[in-house]
Image (tube, helix red, strand yellow):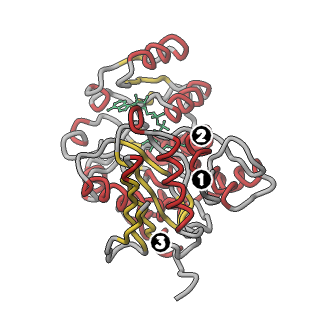
Amino acid sequence: MNITQVASHTHEGVYRVEAAEFGLVGFIAIHSTALGPAAGGLRMKPYGSEDEALTDTLRLSEGMTYKNAAAGLPLGGGKSVIMGDPATLKTPELLRAFGKAVEACEGRYWTAEDMGMTPADMAEVAKESRYVAGLADGKFASGDPSPITARGIFNAIRQVSAHALGDASLNGRVISVQGLGHVGWNLCHRLKAAGAELIVTDIDPDRVQAAVASLGATPVSLDEIYAVEADIFAPCAIGGILNANTIPMLKVKAVAGGANNQLATPQDAELLHGRGILYAPDYVANGGGIINAATEILGIENQVDWVDEKLRALDRTMGDILTSAKEANVSPAVVAQDVVTRSMTPRAA
Ligand code: NAD
């Protein structure tokens, strides 16, 4: 296994990992350890090129810095990727080789499950590294973060409802949800229980059918989700979906969802603001998952109470961001960036 350092002006450490005998090529990016060890998931997916994979790792690891800071965690930002189709290329040997690379970072980077990984895969990585969170077993195991992520997003939706619609109650509100996976599905159940009406889409027709059957949701096509009349849009699938094409179509008062990197560019926050659509910054709204994983990284004994308290603090942070944004008449994305930048006092020079 070869680990080579990649030069970077923006990140503290960027590493290319290769183990040709197992078909492994991947990257680990440590964006910042100003607040603590860098933490962020391991993603496996087919990339068109190494450049594309590296760019994704750099972008995602920077996002983790902001997410961890916004969640008030003593953690910095990092991320890792393995190139290739998990369905065909993922083997225990490849995962263990990657685990050795994580271990070689000596605790400056903690990994966890992300796209293309399962708890069983992370257990394989953990055979070679102590710095793995989101495991199903173990003293501080934190398991699937999605239910806690969904709780945080539900809180964010109530916050934008209060700010944009004058009432935090979701009873009778119409919420459009893109993506009915781990997070979206759990969120839909919470929204339904709060009395909301759901409009849903997913590339998987079975998930849509299940939401129609069990939640009385209204199904729409993948493109229609941007143009439906609703109170709040909750993107819970992929990134980059708030862009120059989709924002003019939106007929909602607010956007609050779980997907990472929802804005295609920072200017898209201004587009939303210009249209009077309140945007809950994604890395604040979806911080529940890393709060859950942090219990494992930090070895928290009383996980339930600790997570509850951190989620309440995250909710207050979101409320403060939305209030400040309204007062200053700027996008909440701008305020959120200020908040996390201010909170990142370096531990050491
Ligand atoms: P998931 O893979 O379980 O679910 C994603 C769902 O979106 C799937 O049902 C998929 O079919 C659907 N989908 C994919 N592309 C789509 C498209 N173009 N249109 C409509 N539906 C589409 O993933 P998840 O764990 O639910 O995560 C969802 C999003 O939230 C991701 O962006 C993820 O990075 C982010 N997120 C997840 C967590 C967590 O705890 N799982 C935490 C923070 C952020």
Amino acid under disc 3 = Ser
What is the number of the mark on residue 96? none
Q: Which residue is mark 2?
A: 119
Amino acid under disc 2 = Pro
What residue is drawn where x is 29% and y is 26%? 222
What residue is drawn where x is 49% and y is 76%? 342
Q: CA distance from mark 2 to mark 3?
A: 26 Å
What residue is drawn where x is 44% and y is 60%? 1
* Circles 2 and 1 in contact, beta carbons < 8 Å: no
Disc 1 crowd rating (10 Å Cα; few below 14, some 14-19, many 20+) is many
Disc 3 crowd rating (10 Å Cα; few below 14, some 14-19, many 20+) is many
Q: Residue furthest front?
A: 21
Residue 314, above or below 72: above
Q: Which residue is mark 1?
A: 315
User: Mark 2 or mark 3: which comes first in sequence?
Assistant: 3
Q: Residue 79 location, x and y as percent? A: 45, 58
- On the question of residue 234 being in view, the answer is no
Whether the residue carrying mark 3 lies under 8 Å from ligand 1 is answered with no
Q: Secondary structure at mark 1?
A: helix
Q: Which residue is mark 3?
A: 32
